[in-house]
Image (tube, coloured by chain):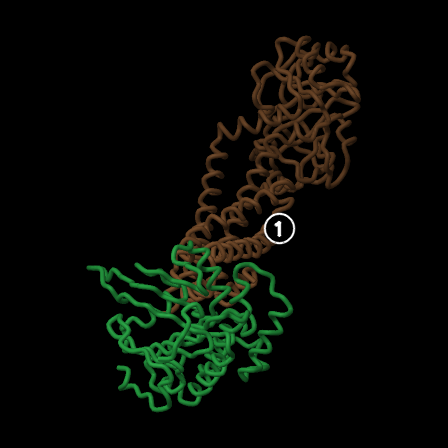
Amino acid sequence: MRSITALRMLMHDRATTAGSVLGVVAIIFLVGQQLSILFGLLNYMSVLVDHMPADIWVCTASTENVNSGGTLPMRYVDRVRGIEEVEWAEPLIRTGGLYSLDDGRFTGLQVVGLSRPELLGGPWRFHEGGVNALLDFDAITVDRMDLDVLGYPEIGSVSEVNRQRVAVGAITQSIRGFEGTVVFTNIDKARQIGNIPADRCSNILIKLKAGVGRGEALRAVGDLLPNAAVFLSRQLSRSTRGYYLSNTGIGGSIGFSTIVGTLVGIVIITLTMYTTVLNRQKDFAVLRALGARRKDIAITILFQGLIIAAVGSVLGFFLLALFLYGTMDSSLPTYMPLWVPPVHAGFTVVLCLLASVLSMRRATSIEPATAFR
Amino acid sequence: MRWRNMAEDVVRLESVTRDFFDGKQMRTVLQETDLGIAPGELTVLAGPSGSGKTTLLTIMGLVLKATTGRVLISGEDVTDKSEDQRACIRLRTFGFVFQQAALVPALSITENLLVSKSIQGDRVTRELRQQAAGLLEELGLAGYGDSRPQQLSTGQQQRVGIARALVGDPRILLCDEPTSALDVESSRIVLDSLKTISGEGSRAVVLVSHDPRVFPYADRLIKIEDGRIMSDTRNPGQGAAYEEVS
């Protein structure tokens, strides 16, 4: 009956209940939207590491961020291939470039060169064409999201990157790096664009044989290449994300707006729930006089907090889903890992319960004798 | 006054007083009072506003704590019971009828009846539902179970208040000015109901009022002034008039 009483009171005070629900929606949506952008940006930061099929990455010494670093000697590739646990090892070139637009302007992009003929670590989602297009010396991929920036090139369109001839061989789908447009090409074209000598590469991608212990293999590669930095993929991904979060202010900025969204929601919920209790003082006094203990009143308010949290969460997540759907494949980076919604919902329920503490204190302090005044 | 065994009292107050702080000083609103309430009687506490009759009623109902003295319910001293224990005793032992019904507007009429016995989280049994429906029927409110309090007239609401007080068969019914907001006809219906209820034998009804229409219904009329019992009359009869008690 306490839960029914809680529900009925909420339904009776529709305006204030709507206000409380709005507070929950604000928390779910505003915080969720900020988090989805944060996760979207995190994905951009480590997009190559997260999607390439390598278990181990070899980078230049002191590298913290996959998008930075110098070059490695190509002989390292042969050394690594000699390790028994390694299934394959391929060099990778990463370099910057300026794409020439038809109107004479340039736009910056990140060029990723893959070793032919395997093209391992190539693009993972295509809108048009396929990875084999990169077997052609001049071929590059462009992403569908960047078509407007690049002047809407089509497959077969010819242009220049760093004054080197390139031809669009395929169009990828939603592949973008933190530093902007990513184009893939073969390793030879990438060397030409970045003016990187034939005996150097940016990274070495290593795939281990099935069943091999990653830790041991990592140590073996590290021992073999003492002048290079060697990472498991997930280590490099984490290190790259950590680097950007701590060096760009993104973490602080999104964290701040998340806190503001949360505070706004808490204030709305607290005030509206408190208003409800103030409006219902007589009812609580009557219930107390009839035999409700303080804890029964507290439980009733607690139920109200939970109901508001549940209804607000459903509405908030519905809006958030619309937002995520609407921004899917758009230039706005949004991504929501599956573990986030339940954690976010749980966090919001806790906030609702905290927000109901003030009204709970008010309601439980109402003296039953006031029912007789 | 007829001879009466004090052990029969369902509520007994011994040397009870009550002080209030009025913002400037302590004020004694109830002077040292001894009072026993027997079952099967309709007792009316009468007196002018501010005389201390509602304070006396709420001390009896364990809503308010006495500053000094003892309160016994069916012979058990409950003076020092904790607040939660007092709430449990209220739930088990008392039915309350408030001025202007004081129904919870968010709840339906049936829910208003049931909440009085299930607010501590107890399951609403089928028997309780049947009793609630039966009480509504007895009080002429059959068919109003799903209505909201605001859909009923003031008199009907007050009858719902009486039905709520009777759910769970409490031994003592405490009524605070139940007819103050009612017209003559509604008052008569409510008072007839309370009289019938008090005549059922094991139940005591205590009614606070300064409404002279109430006095003829009293089996016992207690006059209170300035926090003191001035007179205690049994069977005051049809001729009991306001002047006699004020």
Relative to residue B167, is residue A357 drawn left or right?
left
Is label 1 in a helix, a strand or a loop?
helix
User: Residue A139 at x, y = what percent?
Assistant: 73, 30
Residue found at x 47% / y 77%: B40
User: Residue A235 at x, y = what percent?
Assistant: 62, 23
Q: Which image quadrant is residue A191 in?
A: top right
Residue A370 in view of the camera = no
Q: How many numbered badges does the structure rendering display? A: 1
Tell me if residue B171 comes above or below residue A185 in the rendering.
Answer: below
Q: Which image quadrant is residue A217 in?
A: top right
Amino acid carrying mark 1 in the image: Ala
Instruction: Quadrant for the C terminus of chain A, please.
Output: bottom left
Relative to residue B241, is residue B119 drawn left or right?
right
User: Residue B36 at x, y = what percent?
Assistant: 38, 70
Residue B208 or residue A57, whichever sits in front:
B208
Tell me if residue B16 comes above or below residue A224 in the rendering.
Answer: below
Please identify which colour was used for chain B in the image.
Answer: green
Label 1 Cα neighbours within 10 Å, binned few <14 / some 14-19 / many ≥20:
some
Instruction: Quadrant for the N terminus of chain A, please.
Output: bottom right
Residue A117 or residue B15, whichever sits in front:
B15
- Chain letter of mark 1 equals A
Please identify which colour was used for chain A in the image.
Answer: brown
Q: Tell which residue pokes out farthest to the left in this image.
A: B24
Residue under label 1:
A321
Residue A201 or residue A296, whichever sits in front:
A296
Residue A58 in view of the camera = yes
User: Residue A297 at x, y = what percent?
Assistant: 47, 58
Relative to residue B197, is residue A118 drawn left or right?
right
Residue found at x 46% / y 54%: A269
Q: Which image quadrant is residue A202 in?
A: top right
Residue B3 or residue A297, whichever sits in front:
B3
